[in-house]
Amino acid sequence: LEGPLRESSRIALESSVPHFRSTRHPRPYTMLALASQSISFAGPAAAPSMKVSPQMLFGAKAPAAKKAPAFAYGLPGNFNALGGSELNFDPAGFLEGKSELEVNRYREAELTHGRVGMLASLGFLVQEKFHPLFSGDGGPAIDQIPALPVWLWAVMAGGIGLAESKRISIAFRELDGTKLKAETALKPGYTPGDLGFDPFGLAPEDPEEFKLMQEKELAHARLAMIAAAGFLAQEAVTKATWGTAYGLPDF
């Protein structure tokens, strides 16, 4: 009974699996057919990989390009007093590719020279006739400076040195002991020109009003630098005081 049952099982298996033959003597084309069927379910062996971004999967928009920083990183002084709009005035390209700390260093230098220019312009107007600290020779201020006494030169140099050392200690970073160079000139977080010197309490507490006062200071500072240079040039050319040059010799 075992022989007929085994034979019937073999016949049933041949009818269910195509190209099947006895496993005792497999034919070459039978093995090839079975191998091809198994490979067909494996897929391509070396299909190129394809990376899909989340934007492609979910239909989201690509991230927007990084917004360019404001002119001079938003520092005051970009206001056009005549037209009321922004100036964005940098014809020489000094601000191109500069970091915020480097731009702040430029503003610190501008404010320092502008404040000296305001004092110089005022001095040109009054010192030729009013000089209580020394016995002036009269005449153009450019000729009075070399005639100052030695002690006054020492006092002025000492005063300037103290003021500059105080400004450096507040605004500028310390030098590296080995490289003798600071990583950046100004201290991070330092506001250009803000030395904490306000003996009369003129600085407003409101941020908008304070920014407006900074705009006014810069406008006067820039005008004063031009005025001081003009005074120097006029006296150097005419060899006379500004009063004499403009018809006011008794000033």
Image (cartoon, helix red, strand yellow):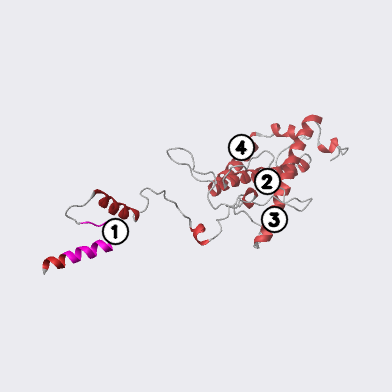
Question: At x 14% / y 67%, what residue is drawn?
Answer: 4
Question: At x 71% / y 46%, what residue is drawn?
Answer: 221
Q: Amino acid at mark 1?
A: Pro
Q: Nearer the viewer, mark 1 or mark 2?
A: 1
Which corner quadrant holds the N terminus?
bottom left
Q: Nearer the viewer, mark 3 or mark 2?
A: 3
Write down the residue under mark 3: 213
Pointer 4: residues within 10 angstroms few (<14), some, or many (20+)? few
Q: Amino acid at mark 4?
A: Ala
Label 3, label 2: how far apart the Cα atoms are = 14 Å
Give the magenta part as a residue range.
7-21
| Magenta part, dominant SS | helix
Which corner quadrant holds the C terminus?
top right
Secondary element at tag 4? helix
Write down the residue under mark 2: 115
Q: Amino acid at mark 3?
A: Met
For marks 4 and 1 on the same chain, the one whose residue lies earlier in the sequence:
1
Q: Nearer the viewer, mark 2 or mark 4?
A: 2
Residue 18: give its label. 1
